[in-house]
Amino acid sequence: MSCHSIVRIGPLNSDDGCYATLLRSSITNYFSSSSSNEDNDTKNDPHRLAISNRYFDASVTFAGLNQSTDDIITASESAVEDGIILVCDSSLSASQGMCFDSLNKLHDNAEKSTDLGDLLRLCVGVSFGPSPLADGTKASEEEYSRRVLWCLDRGYEYVEADMSPVGMESGHNDRDKEGFARIIEAISSCMWSSHVMKKRTAAATTSVTAANIGSGNTQSQPNEKANADTTASAVPTSDSEREKAAVANLMEGVDQDIESKNKAEEIKKQELAFHELERVIADAKNIRESSQNDSISDEERRKLAGDTALRMMDLFDKLGFGDDEEDSDETEASSLPEGVE
């Protein structure tokens, strides 16, 4: 039985200008157009994402805030509530139904009607150009701070997203991503409940085999007669030659052993980092619950939230998220004909 991670997104409506609908379609289009998902069955499904990175694969399905999963999950599939994305008009002059304050009721109703997941919680302020809150005025700074605090109290990350074509294309190669690029990064790096770890040991074995082939060591069982003839013709005749031959025999295979050991240590470090990431997620959940129960002060909550965010970013660095894009760019550049940039 296949498993899907459910992400609630809203508010969804039938209007052509629905920001949540636009964001959902932009996210699905981004993932479906990526090279790793070209042959996936979810390519043309507007509700599903196939997440794939060097560590795991996962299936994510979008649903409305109060939508029944029976509409999108079949009887042969299972689903886990993993997250929620609330969308609003970032402008200070937004209509009542699309302004930031309208999210209060949406969040409360969604929590009552469904068991909301907390692996991914984003609150997205949509604009079509530079953020209206980035004009440098005191009113904008105060409004931005108010929104961030509201999100922290409820376990969300606040993101200002420029949904213009230029805004959606920019920032994906930056180390500290913002806007639409940050939304894609958050979805790509989340350890979804539906994730299936990739077999790292097989990849390591393949790398060692490829190294052997590249070095010319392709004979696993050389002919005994040929080996004997070669050995006989290469018998060292002096002390210096015998010493060199002995050192060569001792060093034979050492490089392979070192490489295999390094691979094993790398895999172990990554597994430890994933366990630590699970602990960080649990800590973040505890901070949110403590905040809702008023068992910690606002100052303590902000400090704990900041420390947790720093721990998570440090773990992402250790796990190498974002390296795929850099590797892809280097590969494409090296494949170009000489003189072409």
Image: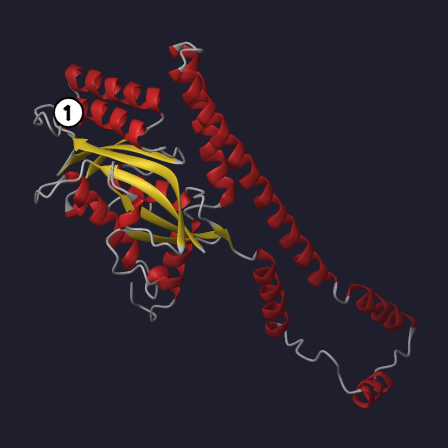
Image x and y of residue 114, in percent? 32, 33
The quarter holding residue 256 reads bottom right
For this view, does 334 lie left or right of residue 238?
left
Give me the residue at 44% from left, 48% from top: 194
- Total tally of numbered discs in the picture: 1
Q: Is residue 139 visible?
A: yes
Give me the residue at 60% from left, 40% from top: 272
Residue nearest the observer in this picture, 38 or 106? 106
Q: Is residue 253 above or below residue 58?
A: below
Q: Is residue 27 above or below residue 224?
A: above
Residue nearest the observer in this picture, 147 or 136? 147
Crowding at mark 1 (Cα within 10 Å: few <14, some 14-19, many 20+) = few
Name the secondary structure under disc 1.
loop
Quadrant location, the N terminus: bottom left
Image x and y of residue 252, in percent? 77, 67
Q: Is residue 176 visible?
A: no
Q: Amino acid at mark 1?
A: Asp
Image x and y of residue 158, in percent? 28, 29
Q: Is residue 275 above or below residue 55?
A: above
Q: Is residue 150 above or below residue 323?
A: above
For this view, does 55 lie left or right of residue 91?
right
Quadrant location, the C terminus: bottom left
Residue receiving disc 1: 135
Residue nearest the observer in this picture, 35 or 110? 110
Image x and y of residue 286, in percent? 47, 23
Give me the residue at 40% from left, 56% from top: 76
Give me the residue at 60% from left, 50% from top: 267
